[in-house]
Image (cartoon, helix red, strand yellow):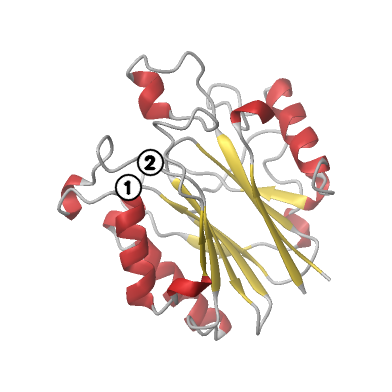
Amino acid sequence: MDVFVATSTVADGSMFNSDDPGDQKVVENRRVFLAAHDITLEQSTRMRITFDSDDFCRYAEVTDTNKSDGMYGTLEIPYDALVVTEPNHALFLPAADCICATFYDPVHHVLGLAHLGRHSLEQQGGMKFVEYLKIHYDSDPKEMKVWLGPAPGKDVYPIWALDNKGMKEVTFEQLHTAGILDDNIIDNPAETDKDQNYFSYSEFLKGQREIDGDHAMVAIMRK
């Protein structure tokens, strides 16, 4: 089994519109981005993120019945990470500053895509998702591979509740504590507040970006 992971850029267009989840321009952006990697909307499941809960470590497995969920419009149930156990089912996560993280267990062929934002990290989300995979799929952290998307720099986006550490700094700490080996972490070191190839909602709010939007991470297992 092979795993493919990719992150879109500003050049690919925005991958989410919070004001209009069914925005046809966004749907077309997704279609073109995925097609470039031989993935279709119909074989993908989008993760929905909300901030109207006290729990930011909500996880679930999706199956073939969930293919295309959220790719054309709204989603009913929010989760902070999704898991698939069958090949050719893509997981899709839009983000504008928070970290998109793909987890892969090559022994049991389990693929997960997690949203590691400030709220999740404050609740030890990096560790909790690894624990979830251990409990539910017998995954060994030392065997897992992890891909991390870009994040804002520590100087502009410190996590006050965690000693003002940066998002990536906290993520690496939690992954290491969970047993993930450093050699198995593939990191995109780009800082969204500085790298114009990625969207940044925080910089948009400051008036530092003319365009608001989300890039996205997609992950899929292939035989």
Q: Which mark is residue 51?
A: 2
Q: What residue appears at the point 27 percent right and 34 percent down from the top-left corner?
A: 156
Above or below, comparing residue 222 to residue 42 in the picture: below
Callout 1: SS: helix
In 3D space, how far apart are the residues under numbered discs 1 and 2 (Cα atoms)? 11 Å
Callout 2: SS: loop
Q: Earlier in the sequence, mark 1 or mark 2?
A: 2
For the C terminus, the image quarter is bottom right
Q: Which mark is residue 98?
A: none
Left or right: 85 in relation to 222: left
Q: What residue appears at the point 17 percent right and 45 percent down from the top-left corner?
A: 160
Kind of residue sitting beneath label 1 = Arg
Residue, disc 1 = 118
Above or below, comparing residue 21 to residue 44 in the picture: above
Above or below, comparing residue 201 to residue 147 in the picture: above
Q: What residue appears at the point 81 percent right and 41 percent down from the top-left corner?
A: 36
Residue 60 coordinates in the image, percent (x, y) = 56, 63
Kind of residue sitting beneath label 2 = Phe
Q: What residue appears at the point 69 percent right and 50 percent down from the top-left corner?
A: 45
For the N terminus, the image quarter is bottom right
Residue 51 coordinates in the image, percent (x, y) = 38, 41
Residue 109 coordinates in the image, percent (x, y) = 69, 77
Instruction: Examine the image and state in which quarter residue 50 appears.
Output: top left
Front residue (pair 176, 91): 176
Left or right: 62 in relation to 191: right
User: Is disc 1 surrounded by few (<14), some (14 to 19) or many (20+) residues within 10 Å?
Assistant: many
User: Is disc 2 surrounded by few (<14), some (14 to 19) or many (20+) residues within 10 Å?
Assistant: few
